[in-house]
Amino acid sequence: MALTQTDVRGIADYARIALEGDELEQMTAYLNDAVDMLAPVLDYDLPDVEPTFHPIGDLANVMREDEELAGRGLPLDVALSNAGSVRDRSFRVPSILGEGGDR
Amino acid sequence: MKELSEVLKDWEAVIGLEIHTELTALDTKMFCNCKLSHDDEPNANVCPVCLGLPGALPVPNKRAIESIVKAGLATNCQIQKRSMFYRKHYFYPDMAKNFQTTQGPVAFCMHGRLDLEVTGRGAAERPDCAFGEAESLSLASASANAEGLSTAMAQQMREGGESAGALAAMSGYDTANLALPERHEDGSYTVPIRILRIHMEEDAAKMVHVGGEEGRIAAASESLIDYNRCGTPLIELVTEPDLRTPEEARLFMEKLRRIFLTLGISDCSMEHGSMRCDGNVSLRRRGETRLGTKTELKNLNSFKALHDGLAYEICRQAEVLEEGGIIYQETRHWEPGRKRTVVMRVKETADDYRLFPDPDLAPFDLSDEFIEHCRAEIPELPDAKRDRYQEDFGIKRADAEQIAGDPETAAFFEESAAGLSGKPAQAVANLIVNELAAYLKGVEGGIADCGIAPSQVASLAKLLAEDAISSNQAHEVFALMAKSGEDPEKIVDERGMRQVSDAGALQPIVDEVLGRCVDQAQQYRDGNQKVLGFLVGQCMKASRGQGNPKLFNELLRKSLE
Amino acid sequence: MAANFDTLTAAQIAAGIAAGDFTAREVTQASLDAIAAREDAVQAFLQVSPELALATADRIDTDRAAGKPLPPLAGVPLAIKDNMNLVGTRTTCASRMLGNYESVYTATCVQRMLDAGCVPVGKANMDEFAFGSSTESSAFHPTNNPWDTDRIPGGSSGGSAAAVAAGEVPLALGSDTGGSIRQPAALCGVVGLKPTYGAVSRYGVVAFGSSLDQVGPFGRTVEDVALAMNALVGAGRDPYDGTSQDCAVDFCEHLNDSIEGRRVGIIPAFMEAEGLTPEVRAAVEGAAKQLEAQGAQLVEVDLPHLDAAIAAYYVIGPAEAFSNLARFDGIRYGYQEPDCPNLDTQSSLSRAHGFGAEAKRRQLLGAYLLSSGVYDKYYYAAQKARTLITADYAAAYEKCDVILMPSSPRTAWKHGEISDPTQMYLSDLYTISINIAGNGGVSVPLGLGAESHLPVAALVGPAFKDRTLLMFARALERGFADAATGAPALTVAPDFAGKGGELA
């Protein structure tokens, strides 16, 4: 069943990527092409095969000690240095509910 | 609105809890080496990992995993050797990566249980104990109708190779091994509460909403984000919806808190948010087998809030239902000041968190050695300690429970009551539960640095047990010894406070008082028993508080016969 | 003696500096001069870092003057793919999203190359966030193939491959999620190794597909690639990357061993695949003969589940990419849309305007594939296909030491020639399955194609034995070397060789 533009708009809204102009149309076409290309994988939902979630088969229980390490933390000015908007010691975002917000 | 006790006569409340506990006893965060702290300035403890900088990778904190395994063992959970971390996606700036690293369908700890003892007034809130009747329906119909929290969770969680049927079984309200409450002769009852799971996850950043009403998100013009808390190790315990009254919910939370405190994995401060509770509740008519629509409650962040919030919500739902209304599946916020719950948001569809196994984190396959190592580090738990105190020291169960629940208090008790049993041990318990607890409320810090030594309490208890002083005198001595650090025996002797329990010494005082209070003596003889209290008081006064009040009582009765 | 530094391998540069034939500053300056002279035509770099490079070089020269022992790659200029963090440089991932992003920490792989003495001369161009096979999706500019500047260099590590092929640097780092080292190495005629997953730390490398990504080196000789591997893995596993493994072996130790009696697998289906050009096929058959001539035995092996590889890859890759790129919301870093009335608008427009078309496509495909109902159908099937493909390889390696196959079905194509994204995906036919299985793979130049006169290459990919892999790569290199000089079949692309970069 092909994805409709409404479906694709829903996915884009969720993924926080605004689609503008003819992007919605193009994206819908692309996603349908791509999903078609993925069809061969559908034959592999085999009951007696374990899925591989990690390429290193027997890797397990990787943990670190509970200790602070010097030099890993970032000084405040460095931590904030790439932010588009800061206030005092904090990262700043505009109104969350704001005009047009739906949360 | 009707009173809770009224509502619960007609309605059965079905309650589940989700309890988040920060592992504050650790030194560093869940997936990075940043310091854990509650009170540092914003963004003082951040690194590429917890800020979600491009290219940063998580590595799990071993002590966090040990802590959750201990939590699971202490709550009778089955420790799952094989489990994985998953990514739970939602776009909100309190999660630096826009996903939370949490666990999937299999948590480190599954299918646990805690037994609650419900006594006193709270026990009356379950008049029925027909608890089991409603649950005797088939699993299939229960899971089909269940709107319990485990269903919502299952919708968000997916497991490889599991059929939809297996998932439904996992998500449904599993009544198969639901045990019934046991009512005791004294009206109290014991009820097992099942724990669905305890999983490991990371906490979110703190957000401050600026502008608009103070601290509220509505009408805020901007929000500020502090990532210090982001990545704090958090364990989330989810109960089965086995709880039936707000009192049970409160007792569960208290019990869990005592266990976690004993394990030493968290400071469990509800005030500071290191232990947080959400609840969900639905109502059904007594005898009804289907579950009603539930609401989720937020901000139940004290024992009182947990109890009162649930109680309010139960009464609110009953009123809506009795008026023919409908309960909407929604999230509500408890406002303790206004004593009401208000709608936060209506859940129309289940959120799609797009959970999938985190490829940056290797799966877990815990060894028996690892689990046994954790088990070996678990100290004596509060229930076992309570039973031991009852048995070894012969103190009252309620006191034993209260003392055993707090590791510092328990240690203090054991030192104070060492070698004692019966009356003197009970005196130690009384002093700790009453005098010490009251004293601690007025001072900074805990038992260890409050300035009172166990030996002082032991000595004071001995004086009490020997009737050398009265409990009123003990109160006075306690205050004095707290201030001076002196031995109570010395205080009592220096101040001549020792209680006189020699009948020969007290009889003259009795005679003198009866000589003075002829009218009152006559009233007693005429059948007014109450006047005896006045006469004892006169004797105490005449003895400058040193006479044994019990003995005065006895002597007065004898003299008046 | 006024040699051009582009005639020297990394090994020769390090040896020359250690011997005092030239200084690290001279080599670094030569590299910077070569970049200045060649960059207009090749455009391999997004950022050149002369101050950082010269300061590093001066430290090496000071150390040498003070008699301190020099690390093995002291003074060797290095290009770094721009998805790797290095303090003192921007890390842009060739995206407008990170156009101004200053690295605040250094990736482990980069740090290890620096610890080995490498001089970081700049950050190399790439497909945006490594999504692509041509480097055309870079938000800033395309990179040209040094062998024919009308053509693409391959991708996504196209800048790294082109910088080495154009003689701007002898060594470069790239990353490979579905062929992003091996395919551009092939198209640019250089050696490129994708090590076994977990061999090289991913910490500090901006993630695309976390279970597929792996960092590896480009060089003009197999020996240089082996030296770079020693630098990358010599210090053992990286505690900051939970998937990092201890693979510390000396990659040079058995490099020149004979392959006599060893077995080389050939997959007949691969040699018949649609889209494989006759010249590439002929070259790979020639490579097989060459290995046979050195005493190796050719055996046929079969990978029965290979037909699912591309589909599985385009389920797993986009799903992980969506998740990994969710963090780019313009709040903590990255492009932030100005003057937005609320957070949702700011996030949606920052992401819409910060990401290019392919990055948006992959993320939306991933978001769709992870959504409720769809996930169960595709993701588990893909991970099961992965299990079977991995088992196929393991079974094949019971019968052979390495497998020989083309690196790319064709030589470099012209800019703009492939515009359909799903067509582009199919060009990764030979490389993708190795990422799915987590195995290592290397691309080795076999000379120029008979028809295109562009580089052709073969790929050998055994499991978890990257050292053996390089031994076979060296055997191929030896087999195709100039009989008189012993020089590899391909060195610096002729249009660029000797332009700028004289060693004073």
Image (tube, coloured by chain):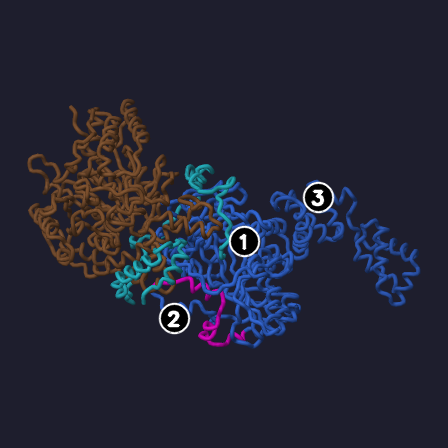
Chain colours: A cyan, B blue, C brown
**Left or right of C241, for residue B217:** right
Q: Dot 1 falls on which chain? A: B
Residue carrying label 3:
B481
**Left or right of B553, for residue C304:** left
- Magenta extent: B132-160
Residue carrying label 1:
B275
- Please say whether residue B133 is one of the residues in the magenta stretch: yes
- Residue at the location (64% across, 47% down)? B454
**How far separated are the C-alphas under marks 2 and 1?**
35 Å
- Residue at the location (15% across, 23% down)? C1
- Residue at the location (82% across, 57% down)? B552
Taken as a whole, is the magenta stretch helix, strand or loop? helix
- Please say whether residue A23 is one of the residues in the magenta stretch: no
Q: Nearer the viewer, mark 2 or mark 3?
A: 2
Quadrant housing residue C367: bottom left
Camera-side residue of C153 and C28: C153
Q: Is residue B50 visible?
A: no
